[in-house]
């Protein structure tokens, strides 16, 4: 009996200590959110102790806010659930006709499979496989088959004046190089044109270089494209300082299928495969022979999707979800049906939220921190393997991704694994951390309708993470 009483007293002491610690944490968080900064904007917070299976703190958790790139948490979780980490994004090369003595008497098709990380290097690999297959000449045409997706290349609620930023890619199931071009600009001699290098090199680009090297401390230049006229003609105007170091600007491409075909034609010629036919968009016939393919798993895609907050990866994932479930023609709307299924699966009503895209770029999305945190908790409790993949895909505080330069000190450093989100007047952060006693904590934070830089908001987020990390 004495041992039982002592054990019971120890249990009470442990519970009492935990309750006091949690109470102090709640008090500290409540005090923080009373800051006068939040008199003119709103913040919502939801934190949960997964180890103890109990809520820690809630504040405005049901309010509907724009999630910004925290929408990628929802897209990622949905894809892990319904695509699986082993799903392959596959870019295929097929042909019709006959191959005789190294000559393809027929057409070559590139079939888009939504691979957001497909690059010029991958294209070269496919072309080399054509050579290995014995093709040295094509007496036919080159086609991009983009029929797996609908024709909408821009998301609902995306802002027209975000053109031509690479953060707002024009979508196709056959992307290459993030459907972007990298422009490297460096000074030459005073009075002379700046040096411009375009990556990848291609005859696709049309531009006039009007950037002049000047003897000034600052550069004043414009590197853009003629997006108002839906043209991929690049615009280079202004001045570059003689003291400037080489810098790069990444610009999105509007006519993505023409871009791919031009690079493909150039890759054929570079690898000594003769071709002088036409290029265009056409749906391949059924049962064509596959000559080469490039596969990439979602397990690989999710890392760049979340670490770098890559919008194209999120949008291609959403459409891959739609295609896998419903077939042609994949759309954001069809992909969102799978998001609705996940929301229902975790016990919430999808009609209480609004989902429009997969990346969070749209200003039409409306979600709550309660929903985001419920998804995080659900994966840990019901899908531990999928949780591990999601956890590893998140940026790590002070270490990498979009959190590389945040929370460089204190208990949150190298502890917080979380997805960031930023739009005009929006800043969000959702993910996981370990408390001081090793408990796994999930959290979601969102602040809306602030003016100016988001640094102040991010500082509040970091402080919340620090408080939760110090909880015992």
Image (cartoon, rainbow, N blue to C red):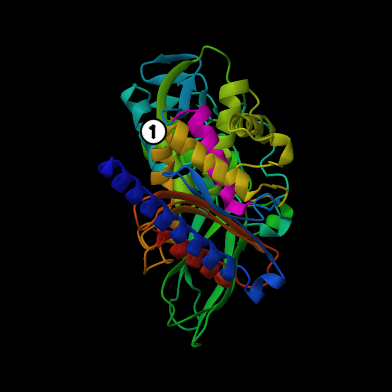
In this view, 278 is above or below 428: above
Q: Position of residue 471 (x, y in %)?
A: 42, 60
In front: 179, or 370?
370
Q: Position of residue 272 (x, y in %)?
A: 36, 35
Image quarter hosting the C terminus: bottom left
In this view, 223 is above or below 376: below
Q: Magenta stretch: residue 123 in it?
A: no
Q: Magenta stretch: residue 80 in it?
A: yes
* Left or right of residue 229, residue 181 in this image: left
Image quarter hosting the N terminus: top left
Q: Which residues are magenta?
A: 67-84
In which quadrant of the rendered view does residue 437 lie?
bottom left
Q: Residue at x 27, y 44 (%)?
A: 2
Q: Residue at x 69, y 53 (%)?
A: 65
Q: Position of residue 126 (x, y in %)?
A: 39, 31
Residue highlighted by disc 1: 385
Name the main secondary structure of what is drawn in magenta: helix
Report the label total: 1
In front: 31, or 282?
31
Is the residue marked by circle 1 packed among few (<14), some (14-19), or many (20+) residues within 10 Å?
few
């Amino acid at each position: 009996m004495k041992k039982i009483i002592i054990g019971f007293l120890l249990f009470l002491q442990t519970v009492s200590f935990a309750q006091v610690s949690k109470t102090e944490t709640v008090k500290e968080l409540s005090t923080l959110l009373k800051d006068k900064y939040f008199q003119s904007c709103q913040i919502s917070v939801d934190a949960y102790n997964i180890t103890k299976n109990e809520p820690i703190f809630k504040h405005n958790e049901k309010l509907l806010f724009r999630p910004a790139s925290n929408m990628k948490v929802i897209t990622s979780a949905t894809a892990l659930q319904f695509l699986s980490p082993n799903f392959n994004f596959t870019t295929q090369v097929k042909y019709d006709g006959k191959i005789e003595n190294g000559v393809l008497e027929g057409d070559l098709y590139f079939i888009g499979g939504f691979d957001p990380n497909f690059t010029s290097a991958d294209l070269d690999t496919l072309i080399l496989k054509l050579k290995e297959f014995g093709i040295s000449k094509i007496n036919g045409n080159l086609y991009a088959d983009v029929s797996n997706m609908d024709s909408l290349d821009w998301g609902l609620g995306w802002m027209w004046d975000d053109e031509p930023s690479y953060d707002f890619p024009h979508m196709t199931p056959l992307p290459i190089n993030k459907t972007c071009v990298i422009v490297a600009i460096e000074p030459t001699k005073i009075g002379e044109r700046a040096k411009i290098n375009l990556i990848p090199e291609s005859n696709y680009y049309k531009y006039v270089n009007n950037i002049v090297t000047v003897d000034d401390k600052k550069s004043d230049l414009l590197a853009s494209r003629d997006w108002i006229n839906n043209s991929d003609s690049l615009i280079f105007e202004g001045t570059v300082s003689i003291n400037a170091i080489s810098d790069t600007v990444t610009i999105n491409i509007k006519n993505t299928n023409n871009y791919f075909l031009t690079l493909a034609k150039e890759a054929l010629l570079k690898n000594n495969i003769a071709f002088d036919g036409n290029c265009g968009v056409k749906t391949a016939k059924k049962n064509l022979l596959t000559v080469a393919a490039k596969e990439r798993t979602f397990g690989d895609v999710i890392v760049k999707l979340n670490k770098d907050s890559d919008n194209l990866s999120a949008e291609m994932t959403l459409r891959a979800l739609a295609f896998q479930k419903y077939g042609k023609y994949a759309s954001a709307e069809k992909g969102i049906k799978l998001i609705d299924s996940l929301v229902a699966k975790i016990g919430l009503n999808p009609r209480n939220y609004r989902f429009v895209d997969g990346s969070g770029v749209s200003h039409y999305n409306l979600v709550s921190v309660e929903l985001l945190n419920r998804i995080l908790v659900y994966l840990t409790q019901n899908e531990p393997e999928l949780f591990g993949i999601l956890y590893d895909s998140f940026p790590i505080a002070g270490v990498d991704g979009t959190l590389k330069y945040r929370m460089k000190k204190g208990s949150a450093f190298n502890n917080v694994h979380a997805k960031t989100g930023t739009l005009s007047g929006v800043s969000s952060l959702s993910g996981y951390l370990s408390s001081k006693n090793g408990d796994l904590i999930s959290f979601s934070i969102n602040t809306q309708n602030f003016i100016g830089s988001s640094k102040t908001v991010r500082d509040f987020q970091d402080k919340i993470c620090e408080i939760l990390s110090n909880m015992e």
